[in-house]
Image (tube, rainbow, N blue to C red):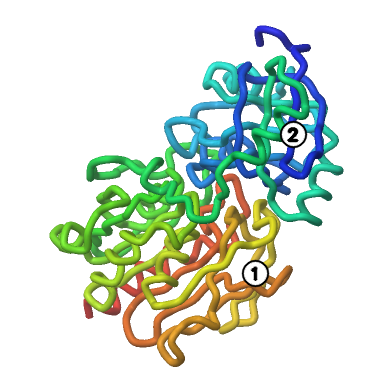
């Protein structure tokens, strides 16, 4: 890192200011400030396209202790606007480490700030909700940065899926290759073809689809129903992604044209897009769900799974047409909808992340459920 002692500031729209030092690239970045409660997986968080438009604060006090390596990236670049930690580890200890976290952030152009009282910051966000903020290593003072934070765009109304999605359809053939990946599932039966619509898809979702025995074609976010169905897929997968689901109107239009013609499985933003396609609405959560320790109850079995989550919006089950859609999962922390299924056509979705890299892996079975649904519809 070029200057480990370079001063840095984090300013929030409510006037709160946090002083620290830079441990990534110099510069300035703004976005919606959220906190993540995961103890590990910081590289997966950095490269998750769902974090586009957000400044991420890690609540765990020491980040970077096992370094960074190419295998753990969820996309081809970091998507967070800036990264906030209490203490950044300069000397990682892992045989898998290729470089320290700070050098990775500097090389990839991500502004990072350490030395922040992340407990105080998290408490502010829990009490006031996610706030717009600016992280800067420049010479401007706190008042100027607070003013810029107040002028930053709100997450509500933002369509960010189109910014992070691939531009052309392409096959995906890579399964889990590393010995450190999630447990592999034995492939059985025929190879079904799945069209995966990319609103910001994570690599480990695609790897799980491949490991489940699917042939996968990935399409851009703006793919139409006609373009998806032209591939003659056995199933359609709707991916995670960033931004306000209500703003991704083209995606809901696409899904409406698919429902009833082919089985559908959605995760995260894909779940929210299904809610809009069903005729429902989504709501903005105060500070969202970001972390790897969220309890979710399956209402059919009564089983509770520990899940990984990253979202700032939630489906509003009371807005669905009565008798068409059933809520299947609930968040035990705040009672929000974490899963649903359509009662007339083969379609289901979850708000959380069953691919969960680096973990937990309680919900991996949902990929097999998707395969079973396709097999049942094909007879």
Which of discs 2 and 1 lies nearer the camera? The answer is: 2
Residue drawn where x is 49% and y is 76% of the image: 340
| Mark found first going from the N terminus, 2 or 1 | 2
Which residue does the numbered mark 1 point to in the structure image?
Answer: 296
Residue 144 image point, x, y percent: 71, 27
User: Observer-nearest residue: 240 or 55?
Assistant: 55
Residue drawn where x is 46% and y is 30% of the image: 77
Q: Is residue 201 visible?
A: no
User: Observer-nearest residue: 236 or 287?
Assistant: 287
Identify whether 262 is placed above or below 232. Answer: below
Query: Viewed as shown, does residue 194 lie left or right of 201?
Result: left
Residue drawn where x is 46% and y is 65% of the image: 271
Q: Mark 2 Cα within 10 Å, few/some/many (few <14, many 20+)?
A: many
Which residue does the numbered mark 2 point to in the structure image?
Answer: 11
Identify whether 347 is placed above or below 172. Answer: below
Q: Quadrant of the N terminus?
A: top right
Residue 174 image point, x, y percent: 34, 41
């Amino acid at each position: 890192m070029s200057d480990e002692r370079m001063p840095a500031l984090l300013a929030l729209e409510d006037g709160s200011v946090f002083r620290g030092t830079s441990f990534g690239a110099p510069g300035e970045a703004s976005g919606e400030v959220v906190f993540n409660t995961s103890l590990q997986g910081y590289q997966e968080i950095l490269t998750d396209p769902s974090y586009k438009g957000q400044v991420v604060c890690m609540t765990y006090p020491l980040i970077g202790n096992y370094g960074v390596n190419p295998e753990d990236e969820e996309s081809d670049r970091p998507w967070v606007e800036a990264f906030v930690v209490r203490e950044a580890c300069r000397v990682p200890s892992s045989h898998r480490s290729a470089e320290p976290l700070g050098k990775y952030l500097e090389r990839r152009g991500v502004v990072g700030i350490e030395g922040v009282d992340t407990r105080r910051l998290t408490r502010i966000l829990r009490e006031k909700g996610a706030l717009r903020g600016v992280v800067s290593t420049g010479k401007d003072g706190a008042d100027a940065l607070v003013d810029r934070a107040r002028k930053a765009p709100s997450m509500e109304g933002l369509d960010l899926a189109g910014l992070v999605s691939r531009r052309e359809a392409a096959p995906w053939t890579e399964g889990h290759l590393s010995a450190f990946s999630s447990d592999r599932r034995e492939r059985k039966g025929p190879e079904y073809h799945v069209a995966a619509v990319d609103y910001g898809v994570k690599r480990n979702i695609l790897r799980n689809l491949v490991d489940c025995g699917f042939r996968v074609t990935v399409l851009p976010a703006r793919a139409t129903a006609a373009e998806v169905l032209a591939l003659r897929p056995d199933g359609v997968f709707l991916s995670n992604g960033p931004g306000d689901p209500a703003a991704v109107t083209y995606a809901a239009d696409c899904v409406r044209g698919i429902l009833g013609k082919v089985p559908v499985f959605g995760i995260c933003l894909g779940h929210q897009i299904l809610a809009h396609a069903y005729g429902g609405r989504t709501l903005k959560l105060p500070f969202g769900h970001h972390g790897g320790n969220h309890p979710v109850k399956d209402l059919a079995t009564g089983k509770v799974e520990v899940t990984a989550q990253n979202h700032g919006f939630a489906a509003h089950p009371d807005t669905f047409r009565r008798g068409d859609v059933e809520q299947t999962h609930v968040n035990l922390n705040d009672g929000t909808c974490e899963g649903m299924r359509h009662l007339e056509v083969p379609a289901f979705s979850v708000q959380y992340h069953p691919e969960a890299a680096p973990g937990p892996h309680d919900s991996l079975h949902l990929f097999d459920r998707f395969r079973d649904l396709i097999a049942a519809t094909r007879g």
